[in-house]
């Protein structure tokens, strides 16, 4: 490739030069960037990042450790892309930049560690003891339920209740000995781990299921969008997120509590799934209210893109800003469709904030349990 | 920054509010113009007292201080062209007070325009001068540039709403100007001197703004004209209707063509498209005003006049105007967005002149803007990596400014002089006026530490 384009030093430049130069520095991203919102430091905003890349392309600076703090501090929530008049897809550009940085030997240590962990373990937390939820694994079944790392190792209570709900609804599913989908590695400068992908596909295909239901919007994205998982589609296996799967069920329960919904970036801005979760919630919660920033404009919970691990203080600050909107909306229950969001929002919740945070499936299960 | 000054600055604001990191230095080199230059450091003060201490120090050491809000300016005003300290005021972002009874809001300079709007809207009020960058721009920046916006024709610009200021002078003294009373003719109007002074005279640390009840109803219509002359007459005669529309926007042929090439809006390729909005408290009132305006348009050979029947249709009519900036921003790697302003009767002459400049210099200039107050935005599109095109852009800009002045207009209606228009100041201002301006600058800032290099104040 270098022969064709002697001037470009990095891959990001070859792929995205035009787009980076399209940034007109209008600063509209500053109004929506969660990292800027939490820090009020313009260097961390999308515009600040594009300016650095422009200077790299102009040969004024190098991709080096000095740039890690901003180029590796992005939740990839895509709010900037959504509001950019010039159509600059910052999250995609940053993914490539991070790969270039890893290539020249500069990276945030947390992400380097994550890549190492996934070479030796099957989950991002390097946990060896797996919660088996007292359920059979790797059985023949109509559906595979794929939990995801956060649901397996950090939010297992929520997962337990989701599985209970599937049981109540009589869904014929099996769990599998799952490995991390490893899509996150692509976000933080590395390549998706093909061994783990192979392992997941083999486990899924062995069950004979034609549909995979994921509990995690990120796994859902990875299975559907990454070529390494293309074999699933080729073999006629469809992957849906649990919110899509549940939208046609009648649960027969209702709550009179005021309920609001947080759009996970991976489901909303990245996959444009806004309506199904709301249809389900409206069925069980007539007192549904929207937060000030919702759907395409939803504020990020601060967990994505590896930020929770690498920059925990700012990650929590981002979650707090989102939780202020829950308070403002007067909600008693905050529902979302992503265990990672639940995890970060719950950790950030202040004692005075009395509302509860659940995944939608978890909450429906609670209602059905009470009714029974 | 030398070690002694660095230590003195961090003593004032703390280590966590001071930076020399490369990432911050690059970020603070730019605004939304094509200018850039690295500062020596960045600092985030939290109070007027801290700002005073910083200025005292900078004045003593003769280090430039460049005040900065959101950095959305289009004229290089916030670019530290002589290096120095970028003083980022975005963390002084408290809404201090809103008093509906006294019809005012008191804010710190780092409050974002849209955040104030949100709070005011809940009370049925608004702060009318609404720059297109209002989602991100700070009120301190709006005051420093005297920002305008879509509603300028009816509601004026930021200057018309600033009642009082707290200002830190370059020697560190803190001064209050103006009054919280609705009227005051007490002494010289220093408030107005500071509004639009581009951070060259003092640092605004608190702003008292007049606010207005928010009109709830609007009517919207769109008219297209095959002939620029007709459009020009229609605009000139709007004033004869006795109505001042709350928005009166125009898109020129080149802009319409660009929108058609880059979207599926499929607009008629006419000489001019004019969008009108009237506002008030009942639909009867806004429809009455709109009819008067459209009567004038109908007398001037429009190709089409479309009136929105509901909010959805109104949004549809606005779509072309709203897409203009984004569409034009994508066409070439670089652009300059000008804001020349002429008396309203000269708008057609300005549009014709712009087309002629574009043809002569073989460069693309797409124009849209606020016809209601004669403030147009010719956007010159070019490739900044091609020296030939840069030359053409510069030549075209120069002629554009000359044209505006020849038409009894001004270099800038709302973006400010900054760096970009500094070389053209003497086109508009005679020797005596320049001398008075420079004298004022010397009086307030004898060591020229505040935002040096801007507004041609050093000549």
Image (cartoon, rainbow, N blue to C red):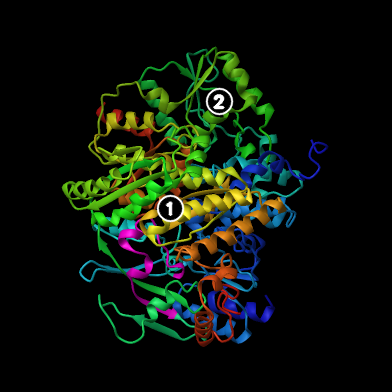
Question: In the shown orientation, is residue B131 left or right of residue A372?
Answer: right
Looking at the image, residue B379 lies above or below residue B87: above
Identify the residue at horizontal 65%, vertical 45% (top origin): A111
Q: Which mark is residue A224?
A: 2
Identify the residue at horizontal 39%, vertical 60% (top origin): B113
- What x and y, as percent, mark residue B130? 38, 58
Number of disc labels: 2
Instruction: Give the quadrant of residue A9.
Output: top right
**In which quadrant of the rendered image does the N terminus of chain B lie?**
bottom right
Q: Nearer the viewer, residue A52 or B376?
A: B376
Disc 1 crowd rating (10 Å Cα; few below 14, some 14-19, many 20+) is: many
Residue underneath mark 1: B348
Looking at the image, residue A261 lies above or below residue B276: above
- What x and y, as percent, mark residue A306? 58, 45
Q: Nearer the viewer, mark 2 or mark 1?
A: 1
Which residue ends up furthest to the right in the rendered image?
A3
Q: Which mark is residue A320?
A: none
- Tell whether label 1 touches label 2 (CB within 8 Å): no
**In which quadrant of the rendered image does the C terminus of chain B lie?**
bottom right
Q: Nearer the viewer, residue A1 or B353?
A: B353
Decide whether residue B151 is among the magenta residues: yes
- What x and y, as percent, mark residue A296? 43, 40
Disc 2 crowd rating (10 Å Cα; few below 14, some 14-19, many 20+) is: some
Question: In the shown orientation, is residue A365 left or right of residue B170?
Answer: left
Residue B192 seen in the figure? yes
Question: Which chain is mark 1 on?
Answer: B
Decide whether residue A307 is among the magenta residues: no
Q: Which residues are magenta?
A: B144-167
Marks 2/1 same chain:
no
Identify the residue at horizontal 29%, vertical 83% (top origin): B185
Q: Dot 2 lies on which element?
A: helix
């Amino acid at each position: 490739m270098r022969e064709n384009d002697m001037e470009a030093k990095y891959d990001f430049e070859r792929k995205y030069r035009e787009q980076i130069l399209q940034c007109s520095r209008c600063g509209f991203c500053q109004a929506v960037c969660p990292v800027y919102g939490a820090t009020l430091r313009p260097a961390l905003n999308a515009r600040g990042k594009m300016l650095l890349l422009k200077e790299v392309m102009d040969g004024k600076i190098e991709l080096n450790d000095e740039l890690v703090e901003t180029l590796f501090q992005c939740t990839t929530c895509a709010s900037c892309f959504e509001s950019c008049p010039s159509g600059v897809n910052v999250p995609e550009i940053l993914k490539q930049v991070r790969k270039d940085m890893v290539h020249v030997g500069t990276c945030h240590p947390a992400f380097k560690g994550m890549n190492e962990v996934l070479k030796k373990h099957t989950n991002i937390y390097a946990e060896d003891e797996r919660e088996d939820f007292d359920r059979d694994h790797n059985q023949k079944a109509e559906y595979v339920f794929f939990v995801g790392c956060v649901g397996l190792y950090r939010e297992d209570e929520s997962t337990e209740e989701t599985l209970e709900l599937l049981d109540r609804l009589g869904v014929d599913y099996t769990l599998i000995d799952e490995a991390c989908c490893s899509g996150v590695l692509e976000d933080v400068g590395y390549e998706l781990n093909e061994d783990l992908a192979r392992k997941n596909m083999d486990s899924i295909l062995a069950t004979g299921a034609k549909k995979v239901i994921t509990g995690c919007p990120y796994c859902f994205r990875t299975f559907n969008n990454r070529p390494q998982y293309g074999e699933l589609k080729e073999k006629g296996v469809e992957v849906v997120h649990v919110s899509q799967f549940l939208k046609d069920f009648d649960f027969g329960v209702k709550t009179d509590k005021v309920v609001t919904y947080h759009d996970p970036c991976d489901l909303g801005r990245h996959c444009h799934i806004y309506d199904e979760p709301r249809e389900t919630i409206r069925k069980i919660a007539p007192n549904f209210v929207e937060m000030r920033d919702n759907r395409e404009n939803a504020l990020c919970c601060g967990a994505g893109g590896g930020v929770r691990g690498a920059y925990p203080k700012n990650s929590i600050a981002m979650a707090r800003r989102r939780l202020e909107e829950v308070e403002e909306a007067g909600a008693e229950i905050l529902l979302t469709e992503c265990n990672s969001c639940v995890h970060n929002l719950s950790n950030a919740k202040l004692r005075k904030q009395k509302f509860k945070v659940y995944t939608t499936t978890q909450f429906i299960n609670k209602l059905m349990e009470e009714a029974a | 920054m030398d070690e002694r000054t660095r230590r003195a600055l961090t003593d004032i604001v703390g280590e966590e509010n001071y930076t020399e990191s490369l990432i911050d230095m690059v970020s603070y080199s730019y605004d939304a113009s094509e200018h850039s230059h690295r500062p020596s450091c960045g600092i985030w003060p939290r109070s007027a007292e801290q700002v005073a201490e910083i200025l005292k120090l900078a004045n003593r050491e003769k280090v430039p201080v460049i005040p900065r809000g959101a950095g959305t300016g289009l004229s290089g005003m916030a670019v530290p062209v002589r290096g120095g300290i970028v003083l980022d005021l975005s963390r002084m972002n408290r809404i201090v007070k809103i008093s509906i009874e006294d019809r005012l809001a008191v804010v710190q300079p780092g409050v974002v325009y849209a955040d104030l709007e949100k709070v005011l809207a809940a009370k049925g009020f608004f702060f009318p001068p609404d720059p297109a960058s209002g989602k991100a721009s700070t009120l301190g920046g709006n005051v420093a540039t005297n920002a305008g916006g879509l509603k300028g024709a009816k509601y004026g610009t930021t200057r018309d709403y600033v009642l009082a200021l707290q200002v830190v002078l370059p020697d560190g003294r803190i001064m209050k100007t103006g009054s919280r009373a609705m009227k005051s003719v007490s002494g010289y109007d220093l408030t107005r001197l500071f509004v639009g002074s581009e951070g060259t005279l003092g640092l605004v640390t608190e702003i008292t703004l007049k606010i207005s009840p928010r009109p709830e109803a609007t009517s919207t219509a769109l008219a297209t004209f095959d002939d620029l002359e007709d459009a020009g007459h229609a605009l000139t005669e709007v004033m004869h209707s006795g109505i001042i529309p709350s928005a009166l926007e125009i898109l020129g042929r080149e802009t319409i063509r660009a929108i058609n090439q880059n979207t599926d809006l499929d607009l008629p390729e006419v000489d001019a498209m004019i969008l009108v909005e009237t506002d008030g408290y009942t639909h009867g009132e806004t429809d009455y005003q709109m009819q008067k305006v459209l009567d004038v348009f109908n007398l001037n050979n429009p190709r089409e006049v479309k009136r929105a029947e509901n909010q959805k249709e109104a949004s549809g009519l606005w779509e072309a105007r709203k897409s203009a900036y984004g569409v034009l921003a994508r066409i070439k790697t670089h652009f300059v967005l000008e804001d020349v302003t002429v008396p309203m009767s000269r708008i057609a002459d300005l549009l014709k002149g712009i087309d002629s400049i574009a043809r002569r210099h073989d460069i693309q200039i797409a124009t849209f803007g606020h016809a209601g107050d004669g403030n147009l935005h010719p956007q010159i599109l070019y490739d900044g990596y091609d020296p030939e095109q840069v030359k053409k852009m510069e030549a075209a800009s120069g002629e554009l400014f000359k044209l505006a002045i020849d038409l009894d207009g001004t270099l800038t209606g709302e973006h400010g002089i900054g760096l970009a228009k500094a070389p053209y100041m003497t086109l508009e201002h005679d020797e005596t006026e320049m001398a008075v301006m420079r004298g004022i600058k010397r009086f307030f800032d004898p060591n020229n530490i505040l935002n040096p290099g801007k507004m041609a104040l050093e000549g």
